[in-house]
Image (cartoon, rainbow, N blue to C red):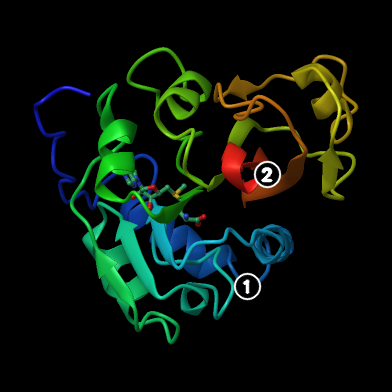
Amino acid sequence: MTAFPPPPLRDRLLDPSGGVVYHLRALRHRHRLWAPFHRVVAGWLADWQPPRRELVIVGPNAGYALPAGFLARFEAVTALEPDPLARWLLRRRRDAAQLRFGRLDCLATPDGLAHLAARFPAAAILFSNVLGQLDAPAADWQTLLARHLPRHAWASYHDVISTGACPAHREACTVSGAETLAATLARFWTDRQLEVIDHRSFRLTGSGPFGYAVWPLTPRCWHLVEWARHRPADQA
Ligand SMILES: C[S@@+](CC[C@H](N)C(=O)[O-])C[C@H]1O[C@@H](n2cnc3c(N)ncnc32)[C@H](O)[C@@H]1O
C-alpha cells in the first residue's frame, strides 16, 4: 500500500453507473421489471451471514436492491456512495439508524482496496452491483480482491455481461463446479450468436459456489448478475 491516501469519493450526480438516470429508472421499474431480480438479491443476502457486527457497503445507491431490514442486521454500517441524492434517500430508510457515510474511494486506485481493508479491519464488505460497472484500476477485480481482502468476509453482486437480447430462461441458479462464461450464458440465452458486452467480472472469487440471475435494467437491456462471496481462511 502506498503512503499516499487514496482519492476521496467525490460527489457525482451524473454518473454512468448511477446518478439521476438510475433514480429515474428505479422510479419506473423497481416495483415491476426489477422486482424478480430484487427477490433473488434478497435471498443471496439472507444466506450471507458473515460473523461481523460491522458492514461496509460499496455503491449502495439509495438501497433499491436491499431488502427492508438488511441494514439493521449490523451494529454499524458505513456506505461509500458518490451520489448525493442516493445518500439522501438511503439515509431515510427505516433500517438506517446505524448508517454513516464514508469518503474513501476504494475503487479508483490499484491500492484502494488495501486502504479499505486497513480503514475497516473488522468489517464485512458488500460490493453492491458496482464492480461490474467500473474498470479495475490495475490487473482485474479478481486479482485486486485476492491481493487486498484475503482476511475480510466480503460479498459482491455485479454485472458479468449485458446484452440487448431477451433471455430464454429467467430462473436464477447456483453454479458450484468449474464452468466457462459461455456455458453459464447458455443457462439463460439460447442464441448461438449472442452479442454481449463483457464486464470482466466473471467468477470474482477463486472458487464457487456462484449465484446467477438476470436483471432487465430496461426492457431492452439485460444484465447477467453474479453473486460471489469470500470467507477468510479462519472463518471457513
Ligand atoms: C449500478 S448502480 C447499483 C446501485 C445499487 N447498489 C443497486 O443494486 O441498485 C452502481 C452504484 O455504484 C456507485 N459508484 C460508482 N462509483 C463508485 C465508487 N468509486 N465507489 C462507490 N460507489 C460507486 C454509483 O453511484 C451507483 O450508485
Q: Residue at x 9, y 27 (%)?
A: 4
Position of residue 100 measured from the top left corner of the image (x, y, whole percent): 26, 69
Furthest residue to the left? 4
Residue situated in front as seen by the camera: 80 or 194: 80
Q: Is residue 181 above or below residue 13?
A: above
In three-dimensional space, the C-alpha distance between marks 1 and 2, rounded to whole angstroms, equals 37 Å
Q: Residue at x 55, y 25 (%)?
A: 199
Position of residue 157 measured from the top left corner of the image (x, y, whole percent): 59, 45
Residue situated in front as seen by the camera: 196 or 128: 128
Position of residue 80 measured from the top left corner of the image (x, y, whole percent): 30, 54
78 with respect to 3 (left or right): right
Callout 2 amino acid: Ala
Residue assigned mark 2: 236
Q: Quadrant of residue 15?
A: top left
Callout 1 amino acid: His
Q: Quadrant of residue 118?
A: top left
172 with respect to 54 (left or right): right
Q: Residue at x 48, y 79 (%)?
A: 72
Q: Quadrant of residue 102?
A: bottom left
> How crowded is the residue under tag 2: few (<14 C-alpha within 10 Å), some, or many (20+)?
few
- On the rendered image, what quadrant is the C terminus found in? top right
Furthest residue to the bottom? 94
Mark 2 secondary-structure assignment: loop
Q: Is residue 164 above or below residue 97?
A: above
State whether residue 157 appears in this view: no
7 with respect to 180 (left or right): left
Circle number at residue 179 = none
Residue assigned mark 1: 31
Q: Residue at x 22, y 24 (%)?
A: 1
Mark 1 secondary-structure assignment: loop
Q: Are marks 1 and 2 in contact (CB under 8 Å)?
A: no
